[in-house]
Image (spheres, grey):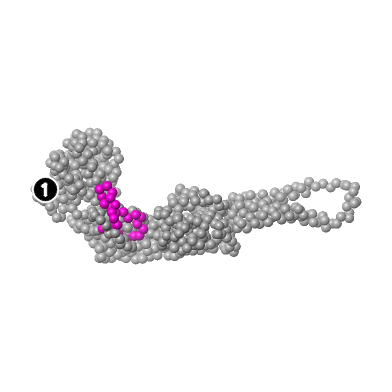
Amino acid sequence: MTFLYPNFLWFLSLASVPVVLHLISRIRLKRVNFSSLFFLKDVKRERFSWLRLKEILLLIFRTLLILFLFLALARPQFQGSILPTKRQAHVAIIVDDSYSMGYGNRFRIAQEQARRIINQLSKDSELMILNTSGRSGLNQSVSGTAMVLDEPVIYSGKNLKLALNLIDQLKVSYFSQDLTKSLLQAQTSLENSSFTNKEIFIITDLQRRAFIPVLTNFQVKFPTYIIDVGDRSENCAINSVLLTERFPQPSRPGKIRAKIKNYGNNPVFQKVVLNLNGKTEEKQLKIAAEEEKAVIFETEIGAKGEYFGQVAIEPDSLTTDDQRYFVFSLPDKIRVLLVYTQSADIFYLERALRPESRSADLSEDKSSNNFDIVITDGRGFRQKNLVNFDVVGIINPSDFTGSDWHRLEYYRQKGGKIFITLGSEPKDKTGLERFCDYELTMKLPGFVTIEKPNLNHPIFEVFAGIDLATAKFFQWSKLRPKQVKILASFSDGSPFLMESEDRSIIIASSAFSLDVTDIVLKPSFLPLIQRIFFYLAKGDIKNEYEIGSTIVTEVPTVGLVKVKTPKEEYSVMPEIVGNQRVVKLKNVNQPGIYRIGNKPLAVNVDSAESDLTRVREGDLERVGFKIQKGSVAGATDLTSLFLYLAFLALVLEMVFLLV
C-alpha cells in the first residue's frame, strides 16, 4: 500500500488522544464513603458491566474515527485490483507517442495502460488525454475531441467510452517528445478543476532527453504518476548525411558521408546502403558500443543538378531512424556582378572566381567555370538591372553615393546577396551604418594577420588545420561592428570578415590587391573567395527539413504547382509574398522525399530521439514523480473506503452515546 499524501500519516498519533483522556479520567476517580450505599446493593451487577463495555466501545470508535479520517486524507493506494472500485476524479493522461515508443511493443502497452486508467474512473469523472508530439495522431476527426494542431490535447470531457475509442486510434508519430508542454497544459487544466481528486499519468519509456528540461524547470503540483513501459534497449540510427565538400564542383567533387551511431551497449556489424538517384552502393562497418562512425561512399558529386535518395541500415527494433533521406542541389552558374573603383582592385578577385580563364577577354565563358561574371565600374553599376545577378560584389566603394547605397539596399530587400570589400575610406558611408561604424583606414609599417576564423561556418569549415595567419595585411579598415556576426578577426582585434544577421551581406575590412595584402598569392585565397560567393548565392546546398517544420520554397511558374509527398500528390496555388510566389507546406509529419514543382526536398526525423538512454528513477522521485511499471496491476484508491469507515465509526459512537 502506498500513500499520495504521506505527510498526513503524522497525524495518526492523534488517535492516542481518546486513550490518554480515558486513562486520565480513571486516575482522577476517588473512593468516597457514602452512608446510603446500603440502598444500592440490590442494583444488578449487569448494569455496571454494560457501562464499562459501553465506555470501552466508545473509546474504540473515537480512536478508529481519527485513524480512518487521517488515513483517508493520506490517500492510500493499493497496488492491485482486489478492490476494483470506481472512483471519481479529474485525471490527465499523457501518452508518449514519439517515435522511440515504436520500439518493440511499447506503444501497445501504453494504450493498454491508458485504457486501464480510464476503466477505473466513475462516469462522473473528468478526463483529459494528451500526447507528447503535439499532434492529434488520430485517423480522423472525432466529435467531442479537442484536436488543435500543435496542441497536445487529444480529448477533454466526461465521455469515457469516446475516450477509450480515441486511445485505440492513437498511433506512434514521427515526432520527438515535448513532455514539458504537455505537463504544463495538464497542470493548468487541473488547477482550474473543482474536483477533489486530481491526478496526472504519464505513460512513457523514460527517455532521458525528454525529462532533462522537466527535472530542471517543472514543479509537480498534483499527484503525478509515471508508468514505465520501456526497458534497456539496443538501437542503431543514421544521424546525418552530408557531402564531404559543401560546395562541390567538377574540379573538386564531393562524396556522400553518413554518420551512424550505435546507442547500445554491444558492438554491431552494419550494412549501410546508399540509394542515389536509383543506383545503390553498399558499405560494411563495425560500430563499437556507444560509438558514432562515419562511412564515406565512393560515388562522386560535382556536376550541376539535383541528387536525392536515402542512406539505410539493416532494420532493428526501432525502424524509424534506420534510414535518412537527402537532397543535394548543385546550382547552375552563379551570376556575379563585380563593381570596382580602380581596376587593380578587381584583378585577383576576378581570377579567383574564374581561375581557368586564360583569355584576356573577361566575357569569355568557360563551361567548367562555376561563375558567370560581369565586371563594371560605378557608372556601369547605375545602369545594370541588379535583379539579374545572384551576388553583387562592391569592391572598394570609395566613390559610392547615397543613391548607390539606396539602390543596393533595395536589391538586398528583394532577396539579393552582397559582398563588400573596403579599401580607401568611403566618401558616403550610408550603406555601412547599419552594420558597422567606420573609424579609420589603418596603414602602418607593420602588418596584421587573420585570427579566430569561425571554423563552424560554411565558409571556413574547410580551413580546419590550415594556418591562415601566414597571410599579411598591410592596409585595412578599422571597423566597429553592429548587428553582425564576426566570421574572422585581425590580430589587432578588429573584424576581418563580418556577416549580417539575415546572411545577405558579407563585409571584408580589406581590399584584395597585391599592394594591400599577400593573401592573393596564398593557396587559401581561391577557396576563400569562391566559398564566400557560393555561400552568398546558395547558402547550404543541402535541402533538408525536420519533421514538424514548415517548408517554404519559391516557385517560378504561374498557376497551380504540383506537390508530391510520400503519401499523396496534389496541386496548390502559390501564395504571393512580396514579389515572390511561394508554396508553403505546414507541419510536415512524415519523413521522405518531397517535391514542390521541380524542386526535391528531404524531410527527416529528429535524430536526438534515437538515443534511448533512460532517466534515473531516483531523479524523478526526488522532484515528486511516482514511478509505476507498465506490467504491474493497476492501483486501487482506498480513500473512499476509509472515509466510509470513518463515517461508520462516527455513527456508531453517536448511537452508543444515545443508548
Q: Which residue sits at x=69%, y=53%?
A: 650
- Visible residue check, residue 275: yes
- Visible residue check, residue 255: no
Pick the residue in front: 152 or 533.
152
- Give the extent of the magenta segment: 572-597
Left or right? Give the position of 618 relative to 305: right
- Three-letter residue code for mark 1: Leu
Left or right? Give the position of 109 relative to 242: right
Q: Which residue is mark 1?
A: 362
Q: Position of residue 353 (x, y in %)?
A: 17, 49
Q: Which residue sits at x=56%, y=59%?
A: 122
Mark 1, residues whose alpha carbon is within 10 Å: few (<14), some, or many (≥20)? Answer: some
Can you say which quadrant of the picture contains the C terminus? bottom right
Pick the residue in front: 513 or 448.
513
Q: Image quadrant of residue 561? A: bottom left
Q: Position of residue 576 (x, y in %)?
A: 28, 50
Left or right? Give the position of 240 relative to 217: left
- Asked if the magenta segment contains residue 586, the reply would be yes
Q: Which residue sits at x=14%, y=55%?
A: 367
Q: Image quadrant of residue 295? A: bottom left
Can you say which quadrant of the picture contains the N terminus? bottom right
Pick the residue in front: 161 or 120.
161
Q: Which residue sits at x=42%, y=54%?
A: 148
Q: Position of residue 378 (x, y in %)?
A: 15, 40
User: How many numbered marks, from 0 up?
Assistant: 1
Q: Which element is circle 1 on?
A: loop
Q: Is residue 39 above or below residue 165?
A: above
- Asked if the magenta segment contains residue 132, the reply would be no
Q: Position of residue 101 (x, y in %)?
A: 42, 61
